[in-house]
Amino acid sequence: MLMLPIDTFVGRFLQHVLPRGFNRIRHYGLLAAHHKRARLAAARAALQMPESQPVTIEAAEAFLARVSGQDPCRCTHCLLGRWHPIVVLAAAPGCRDGPS
């Protein structure tokens, strides 16, 4: 285990503390926002990795139909008609989870 004198340790530690008014730059180099897409594509090509596939967002009705095998909008009484939204209720002011 390497032991450092106190003044050396404190000096090295304080090199990582930013002066007041400075902002830390979190992403630079490969992950810089300006060239991020092109540089990540070049890194994938260099590592021979496949292109990432975007995640498709499935609608709730389509998900329920796929999982249950039944149409969630079909009328449960007559099995012919379909449910249609008439009014969309907004959350009450000050309510975090919406109407209950």
Image: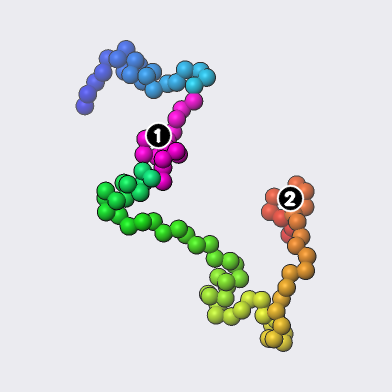
Dot 2 surroundings within 10 Å: few (below 14), some, or many (20 or more)? Answer: few
What amino acid is labelled 1 in the image? Tyr
Q: Over which residues does the magenta segment extend? A: 23-37
Q: At 53% from the left edge and 75% from the top edge, which residue is drawn? A: 66
Residue 31 position in % (x across, y down): 40, 40
The mark lying in front, picked from 1 and 2, is 1
Above or below, 1 relative to 67: above
Q: At 26% from the left edge and 18% from the top edge, which residue is drawn? A: 4
Q: Can residue 72 be seen here? A: yes
On residue 95, which mark appears?
Answer: 2
Q: Secondary structure at mark 2?
A: loop
**Type of secondary structure dominating the magenta stretch:** loop
Residue 1 position in % (x across, y down): 21, 27
Farthest left residue in view: 1
How far apart, in angstroms, are the residues tagged by discs 1 and 2? Answer: 40 Å
What amino acid is labelled 2 in the image? Cys
Q: Secondary structure at mark 1?
A: loop
Above or below, 63 relative to 90: below
The quarter holding residue 91 reads bottom right
The quarter holding residue 88 reads bottom right
The one nearer the camera, 89 or 42, is: 42
Where does the C terminus fall, quadrant-wise?
Answer: bottom right
Q: At 39% from the left edge and 56% from the top edge, which residue is drawn? A: 52
Quick one: label 1 or label 2, which is nearer the N terminus?
Answer: 1
Question: Does the CB distance between marks 1 and 2 fall below 8 Å?
Answer: no
Q: Can residue 6 be seen here? A: no
Residue 54 position in % (x across, y down): 45, 58
